[in-house]
Image (cartoon, rainbow, N blue to C red):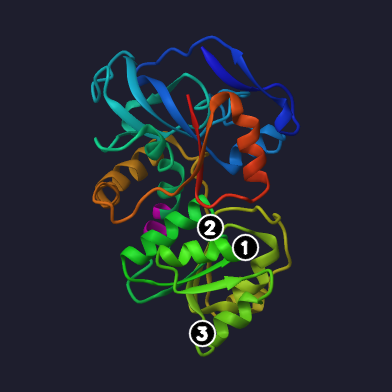
């Protein structure tokens, strides 16, 4: 089969489309003929040698999400039949013509959707759903600050927060992205290229702050996050695009009784992944099918153009998701 191969650690130029052996589904797994695959920052980090694939996943084939058709069933797999259209998360290997996955973490594609739409959903929407609604327990009327609101996870989180009638604040360094985010329901847009998000949040909340922070940036915003959180506020750290370390005011954490959580999907156990997938199918897939929330597709590339897709994501030029067609 054809697959994107990381030939060595480095820039986008190290990605090559090569012929590699096709995977075989293990017991309980399905083999999927991939039609589209999402591109994520984890792929960039893996390419640079900074985020190795977990045990059992292909070490040199990136790709955490796919949409396609069931091509074969492993021993004992009964949840799907050959030809079913499915989408889902994998720990790696989705940037290829074929990928294997456990049958219980595959999700049905909405019938009217394209493969490109479906491939733009699993990583960002499951991440946002799990972080905001399952772990932070965001509720109607609460205020949530979403950093990097124009990113894939950011646009998904914004839509989910809006769908439950939370009050939304969002940051970006690009005015055009903030304008597009307003069209998705963003109430308070903060342009961090010229505004201090701490000052804006304080002004717009009369000094009380926000209840929840969804942090996709990391180090550079940690101190500000603690300042803008209300008493008993909650922060969940999902990404570290800006850096992985920063000083922390533990006195403020204690006095404000803050909750700070870190989260990642890729390293979870199979049972944990099954649980979050099952909950997502029940709670969020109906909203997607009804068009109440939707995947935001920035651009599609052919599998052979994967280096260009990586460059666009590295340049922070995207609003929403990049998808490779296979």
Chain part drawn in magenta: 129-135
132 within the magenta span: yes
Asked whether residue 131 is in view, the answer is no
Distance in Å between CA atoms under marks 2 and 3: 21 Å
Q: Which residue is mark 1?
A: 174
Residue located at (68% from left, 48% from top): 315
Q: Residues within 10 Å of mark 3 (few under 14, many from 20)?
A: few
Q: Is residue 277 above or below residue 70?
A: below
Residue located at (46% from left, 43% from top): 123
Label at residue 204: 3
Q: Quadrant of residue 164?
A: bottom left
Q: Secondary structure at mark 1?
A: loop
Residue located at (60% from left, 74% from top): 226
Q: Quadrant of residue 59?
A: top right
Residue 141 position in % (x across, y down): 35, 77
Q: Secondary structure at mark 2?
A: loop
Q: Are the residues at dot 2 and dot 1 in contact (C-beta closer than 8 Å)?
A: yes
Residue 219 position in % (x across, y down): 69, 61
Q: Is residue 78 left or right of residue 93?
A: left
Q: Is residue 307 above or below residue 26?
A: below
């Amino acid at each position: 089969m054809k697959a994107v191969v990381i030939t060595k650690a480095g820039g986008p130029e190290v990605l090559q489309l090569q012929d590699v052996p096709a995977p075989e589904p293990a017991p309980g797994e399905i083999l999927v003929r991939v039609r589209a695959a999402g591109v994520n920052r984890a792929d960039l980090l893996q390419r640079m040698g900074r985020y190795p694939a977990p045990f059992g996943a292909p070490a040199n084939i990136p790709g955490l999400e796919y949409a396609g058709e069931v091509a074969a069933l492993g021993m004992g797999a009964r949840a799907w039949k050959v030809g079913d259209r499915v989408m889902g998360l994998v720990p790696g290997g989705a940037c290829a013509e074929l990928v294997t996955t456990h049958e219980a973490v595959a999700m049905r594609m909405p019938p009217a959707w394209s493969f490109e739409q479906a491939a733009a959903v699993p990583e960002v929407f499951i991440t946002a759903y799990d972080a905001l609604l399952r772990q932070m327990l965001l509720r109607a009327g609460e205020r949530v600050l979403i950093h990097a609101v124009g990113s894939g996870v950011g646009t998904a989180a914004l839509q989910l927060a809006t769908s439950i009638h939370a009050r939304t604040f969002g940051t970006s360094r690009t005015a055009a992205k903030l304008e597009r985010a307003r069209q998705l329901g963003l109430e308070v847009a903060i342009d961090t290229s010229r505004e201090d998000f701490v000052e804006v949040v304080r002004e717009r909340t009369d000094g009380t702050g926000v209840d929840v922070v969804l942090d996709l940036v990391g180090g550079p915003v940690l101190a500000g996050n603690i300042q803008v959180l209300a008493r008993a506020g909650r922060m969940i750290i999902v990404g570290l695009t800006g850096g992985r370390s920063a000083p922390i005011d533990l006195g403020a954490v204690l006095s404000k009784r803050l909750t700070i959580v870190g989260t990642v999907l890729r390293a979870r156990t199979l049972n944990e992944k099954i649980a979050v997938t099952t909950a997502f199918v029940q709670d969020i897939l109906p909203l997607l099918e009804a068009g109440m929330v939707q995947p935001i597709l920035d651009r599609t590339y052919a599998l052979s153009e994967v280096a260009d897709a990586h460059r666009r994501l590295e340049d922070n030029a995207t609003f929403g998701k990049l998808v490779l067609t296979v």
